[in-house]
Image (cartoon, rainbow, N blue to C red):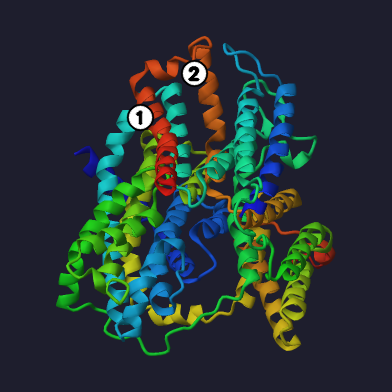
Amino acid sequence: MDRADRISSIFWLCFAVLVGAASYRLGLGNLHKPGPGFLFFWTSIFLGIMSLAILVRAWPKKRTEGPEGPEETIFGKQNTLKIVLVMTSVFLFAIFMETVGFIPVTLLLFVFLLGIIEKKSWRLTLFVSVLVAVISYLIFEIWLKSQLPKGLLGFLRF
Amino acid sequence: MDIIQSVLYGFQVALQPINLIYCFFGVLIGTLVGVLPGLGPPAAISLLLPSTFKATPVSAIIMLAGIYYGAQYGGSTTSILVNIPGEAASVVTCLDGHQMALKGRAGPALGIAAFGSFIAGTFSIIALTLVGPFLAGIALHFGPPEYFTLMIVGIMVLTFLSSGSMVKALMMAAVGLILSGVGMDSISGKYRFTFNIRVLLDGVGLVPVVMGLFGISEVLENLETEIKREILTAKVKNLLPNLKDWADSIWAIIRGTILGFFLGIIPGGGAIVASFASYAVEKKVSKHPQEFGKGAIAGVAGPESANNSAAGGAFIPLLTLGIPANAVMAILLGALMIHGLQPGPLLMTRAPDIFWGTIVSMYIGNGMLLVLNLPLIPLWVMVLRVPYYLLYPMILLFCLIGSYSIGNNTGDVIIMLIFGIVGYLMRKFRYDAAPMVLALVLGGELETSLRQSLMLSRGDFSIFVSRPISLGFLIIAILLLIVPIMTQRKRLSRLET
């Protein structure tokens, strides 16, 4: 876990420095009347110290005994490509949801996830995609009145 | 007498047909969530939170609470039949529950889990009814310093009991606190950490954050490796435990109930800790500890009672002090705030329908769960057969719709997705999300009470130690910080010698 701790602690240290600087700019006030940046400035200092503690603990030590084993990987044999593709598709869903409309993007999302990522048969993919798009629209738009974007299908006025 | 009248009023609220329907859906969804591996109660509650926006606050809270305690019931089913815990509090149930199932005793295992859950759930609700008003009465005397130190204790307990490194948990609490500062400062009117991004002007919403941290990240983690499910194909029969089963488990149920209740009250405790603690206690007091892990019914009855009792107990600090005991309660606290309510000692007097209606709905919900759980087991087994390739796109869609419907803008969806990635990375780098969520929820109140305290004392920090309750809370917080350091040092010195 040392390598992962080194990476994460450096990230949080940088984050703490940025928050500390932003809080300082906001104004710390004084103890009688703490300013808007007061709590967050001290919180960022605390975060920085904790990050340093993790970093120091995870810093590679000099070898005293025999050779160390290979360092562990954070993203090893897992399905990283699948995760990246799934996340990309949901980001695209979010971006095009308002312009294209809820039903078409849901349909496309399910076709992509089931047909391309999961490699299911096209009959099953299309059946599930249409079913989910229609039922979810009925539940959220008609029953729960969530005001989902109509986009390209807005002219249908349903 | 007051309590009796209040409980009767609670029944009047909870028995309204619409609230009964919400309660029913809550426990049904809760059981379903408990049954389904890969979807825990925090994720499910955050997923369904936006769907309650159109409901009245009392109906919304009744349903969300139902999901939480319903999940504790459902979790045992997968643990026993599939050897995969439906949710974290049922991990221990796998040990003996599945062994019982392999020996052809799945029925009594499921039965005792359901009865134990019912007994424990009912006990904790009665205790909540009695203890709640008493605690709320004490909390009425709290001022800003007491609230500030109490919230510090809440965060410290959650970090103390965090699954991984305590330093990392403290860091996550600090990050949550910083996130709570995004948006407009209520005292000075200045915008903080918004970087002129429109969606950040109102602050970082709790719903997108928890949906991302718990919902999306859980999906991503499950995508890494296929969940293999070996469902018991034999028919489940004899759900009613026999007299010997009862004799073997009744004390385990009683002990689990009491232990779970107290662990549930403590902020940071909750169902997971309770179930593990109960298993350890049962193994210790048993005359046949060697049977544990090989199908001892007490190993199912104790933890299942403890996790349900803890689920009820966790409502006490939330409803009486406004302090969430765990991540689920933090989300419920957020839900109450979204519905325009301020949880705390005044909730009982300002919104008695919420306070008593929710408590009484739990009695009704518990009854519903007992009726639901046993006869519907074949249905839950069928649900377990839903393949994950169908389940995860649905969870993703729920998250997308849920986060969009908060404010009908894609900004919240993007925030949710970003926190999904953050949550996934946090899992990979072993950072616990619960302290972050708790600090995010409490952050606003914590900052206000700190600033009010300092204004009251004209900048003198001794206000926190000169008031006895506040001093007591501070001592607890410091102890929680010191104890792990001391025990770690002892362990290190023992290793060196």
Q: Please state which amino acid type lies under the numbered disc 1.
A: Ala
| Mark sitting on residue B453 | 2
Between marks 1 and 2, how big is the CA–CA gap?
A: 17 Å
Q: Which residue lies furthest to the bottom in this view?
A: B234
Instruction: Quarter of the image for the N terminus of chain A: give it.
Output: bottom right
Few, some or many residues within 10 Å of mark 1 (<14, 14–19, 20+): some
Q: Which residue lies furthest to the front in this view?
A: A65
Residue at the location (62% across, 13% down)?
A30
Subunit bearing disc 1: B
The image quadrant of residue B378 is bottom left
**Is residue B12 something one can see in this rendering?**
no
Residue at the location (66% across, 48% down)?
A60
Q: Please state which amino acid type lies under the numbered disc 2.
A: Ser
Residue at the location (77% across, 78% down)?
A116
Say which label, 1 or 2, has the lower sequence index: 1
- Is residue B259 shown above or below B493? below
| Mark sitting on residue B139 | 1
- Position in image of residue A72 (x %, y %): 65, 61
